[in-house]
Image (cartoon, rainbow, N blue to C red):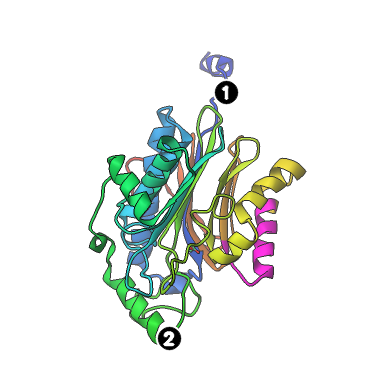
């Protein structure tokens, strides 16, 4: 009887959230158990924040934003608080978001006082007629929109400051997860990164977002791929939602997020293959990193050509999966709200 009732019910529409916290030379030997647990916990909280929205019938855009806010607020990731420093000793933040239903998008770049850059990107998308606002203009707009403005010192973390001093001493501009870079202290040489999320809501709408502090020791108003629609972020209900992390210049030069979506849309390339093709193009010009990809059926892929990528996903069943290293995905919990890593 119960079985018949179940069979008579229409299929539950799929919901799905996929997140990343940066790709790089992340290896088990470089992460202490405590650090691993700390990252896992924030990733789980991020998944939980987006999941409760999707489960309650909220939109994919809101789920993406909520998931990213959790990682922006954590000092563990190179986004929001905990962002890397520029050569001039500032934290300059970039973010973007895109709605796959309307292909509306919003982005901010080189901002220094907006607590949650992804919220500013969202406001640009919904409350302005523009796609990208930068610097002082973006900050004035965010304040007008009632977003939280903080003193630039809010973004300061000692680890990032030391990372900048080392980068200056070595005269290098560093990806957050450069292979041979790290402060030589136990538990400190793990690589961290940009954050992103892609989501599918119960109405079949996709969304994508990405947020970053960019590169350590970056100069001259450098902006990477993360706030650039088509490079670091893309979403189109007809194909996929994509968020990227990695060597931003190469992701811009290969239009990585759009090229992944275009392969799926125009060539019907399977999503994992499309992501791998995009990563191959990036590798061919000397870059590396990762992509998370999700389609409107709820199929997803988390691909990277680095040693590891902080990542996780959750769907209708509420079971969160968190992965850090290559080929190692571990179920974290079967209850997305009561997280017990
Ligand atoms: N893609 C980012 C940038 O180039 C960096 C990262 O993913 O860690 O700004």
Is 320 left or right of 244, judged from the image as shown? left
- The percent coordinates of residue 102 (x first, y second) are 56, 33
Tag 2 or tag 1, which sits nearer the N-term?
1
> SS of the residue at dot 1?
loop
Residue beneath disc 2: 170
Is 269 left or right of 87, judged from the image as shown? right
Q: Which region of the structure is painted magenta?
A: 274-289
Compute the Cα span from label 1 to label 2.
57 Å
Q: Is mark 1 within 8 Å of ligand 1?
A: no
**Residue at the location (67% across, 52% down)?**
259
Query: In this orientation, does residue 127 appear?
Result: yes
Residue 215 in the image: above or below residue 244 = below
Q: Residues within 10 Å of mark 2 (few under 14, many from 20)?
A: few
Q: Main secondary structure of the magenta part?
A: helix
Residue 228 in the image: above or below residue 165 = above
Instruction: Choose between 222 and 212: the one closer to the eye.
Output: 222
- Quadrant of res 239: top right
- The percent coordinates of residue 297 (x first, y second) are 61, 35
Query: In this orientation, does residue 341 appear?
Result: no
Residue 274 in the image: above or below residue 186 = above
**Residue at the location (37% across, 62% down)?**
92
Q: Residues within 10 Å of mark 1 (few under 14, many from 20)?
A: few
- Quadrant of res 303: bottom right
Residue beneath disc 1: 11
* 159 inside magenta stretch: no
């Amino acid at each position: 009887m119960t079985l018949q009732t179940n069979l008579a019910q229409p299929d539950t529409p799929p919901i799905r959230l996929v997140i990343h916290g940066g790709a790089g030379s992340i290896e088990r030997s470089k992460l202490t158990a405590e650090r691993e647990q700390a990252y896992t916990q924030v990733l789980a909280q991020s998944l939980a924040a987006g999941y409760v929205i999707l489960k309650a019938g909220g939109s994919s855009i809101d789920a993406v934003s909520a998931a990213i806010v959790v990682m922006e607020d954590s000092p563990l990731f190179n986004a929001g608080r905990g962002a890397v420093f520029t050569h001039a000793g500032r934290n300059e933040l970039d973010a973007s978001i895109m709605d796959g239903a309307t292909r509306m998008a919003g982005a901010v770049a080189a901002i220094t006082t907006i607590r949650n850059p992804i919220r500013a990107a969202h406001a640009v998308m919904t409350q302005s007629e523009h796609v990208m606002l930068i610097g002082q203009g973006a900050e004035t707009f965010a304040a007008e929109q009632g977003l939280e403005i903080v003193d630039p010192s809010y973004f300061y973390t000692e680890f990032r400051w030391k990372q900048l001093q080392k980068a200056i001493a070595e005269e290098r501009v560093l990806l957050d997860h450069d292979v041979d870079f790290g402060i030589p202290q136990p538990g400190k040489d793990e690589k961290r990164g940009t954050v992103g999320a892609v989501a599918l809501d119960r109405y079949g709408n996709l969304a994508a977002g990405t947020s970053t502090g960019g590169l350590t020791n970056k100069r001259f108003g450098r902006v990477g791929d993360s706030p650039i629609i088509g490079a670091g972020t893309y979403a189109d209900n007809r194909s996929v939602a994509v968020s990227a992390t990695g060597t931003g210049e190469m992701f811009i030069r290969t239009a990585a997020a759009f090229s992944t979506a275009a392969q799926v849309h125009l060539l019907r390339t399977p999503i994992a293959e499309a992501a791998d093709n995009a990563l191959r193009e990036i590798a061919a010009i000397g870059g590396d990193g990762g992509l998370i990809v999700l389609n409107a059926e709820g199929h997803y892929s988390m691909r990277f050509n680095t040693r590891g990528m902080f990542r996780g996903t959750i769907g209708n069943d509420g079971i969160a999966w968190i992965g850090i290293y290559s080929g190692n995905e571990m179920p974290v919990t079967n209850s997305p709200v009561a997280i017990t890593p």
